Image (spheres, rainbow, N blue to C red):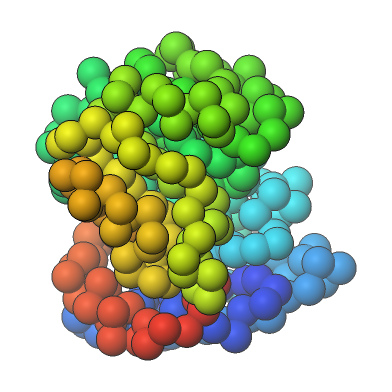
Amino acid sequence: MALFGVIGDPIAHSMSPLMHKSAFNDKGIDAEYVKFHVQKEQLPDAILGIKALGIRGVNVTVPHKEHVMSLLDRIDPLAEAIGAVNTIVNESGKLIGYNTDGLGFVEGLKKIAGEQLENKSMLIIGAGGAARAIYYTLASSGVKRIDVTNRTPGRAEKMIEGCPFELHSDFLPLEASEKTLQQYDVIIQTTSIGMFPHIEDSPLVISDLKHGSIVSDIIYNPLETALLKQAKQKGALTQNGLDMFVYQGAHSFKMWTGITPSYTIMKNTVLQQLGGQHVNR
């Protein structure tokens, strides 16, 4: 039996085990996926344990995505640029780090935007780890215009300046971005604002939203945030964070096994388990 898992702190509410087990069962793969509660000071020993136990692959969640990088044998260039790893592949005892968060988001976005994203003008709300993964992955895929809005400029400007991919990008204060929404084809909300239990909160006012634009919120608890409700009323196409979560897991699954899992089965498993509870990964 092949062994896989997820490491994080906290980890009790992780949905990854159920999601991946459903995919393993569907593909007839004899495997187990386990939650490992790993505190920060235990991380070096945990990484050694992956090698010692022959664990085939591991997902990494908060707070270890950045700290784990120095403990691995090799980092994929995109994950290196993002500065975070969420997937570890054990290749004959060598641990390789990848980041599938941005890949999962882009694949989900293509579902509602169509395959061509390169010519769309985008605005990202937030400048945290999720924003960085999405921003750099979109840039690496050829998108040429991505602006960033955030409560404070420092982290956003650092994210923009550190991007190794060619694109046009400006920082906008939140109030300024609210006045220029007509410029954007896609608006991507990456903060925790609007997440359960604060479901009435919204990161910005979207009264000037362009009709027919896409508004994507990476939150999926609730499945429809206040921002998405407002955007739908304005005639926008909307998307919650469930696609990103499922597709990032599907990318990890394929990296570990070489097999493309059923997105539908993985998504339905998560939907059955949501039930209004807070989820980590």
Q: Residue furthest front?
A: 207
Q: What residue lies at 55% left-to-right and 33% top-to-bottom? A: 174
Q: From the viewer's side, name the closer residue of 86 and 113.
A: 113
In the image, 56 versus 15, the foreground residue is 15
Residue at screen point 45% across, 50% down: 101
Number of dots carrying numbers: 0
- The residue located at (24%, 40%) in the rendering is 214
Q: Is residue 262 left or right of residue 127?
A: left
Relative to 3, say whether 208 is above or below: above
Residue 156's spot in the image, x, y percent?
63, 30
Residue 70 appears at what percent x and percent y?
75, 46
Examine the rendered structure and indicate whether residue 156 appears above or below residue 225.
above
Q: In the figure, is residue 203 to the left or right of 51? A: left
- In the visual, does 65 lie left or right of 14? right
Location of the N terminus by quadrant is: bottom left
Can the viewer see residue 219 in this picture?
A: yes
Residue 104 seen: no
Location of residue 219 in the rendering, given as x and y in whole percent from the top left corner: 43, 61
Instruction: Determine which quarter of the picture holds residue 53.
Output: bottom right
Residue sitting at the far right = 41
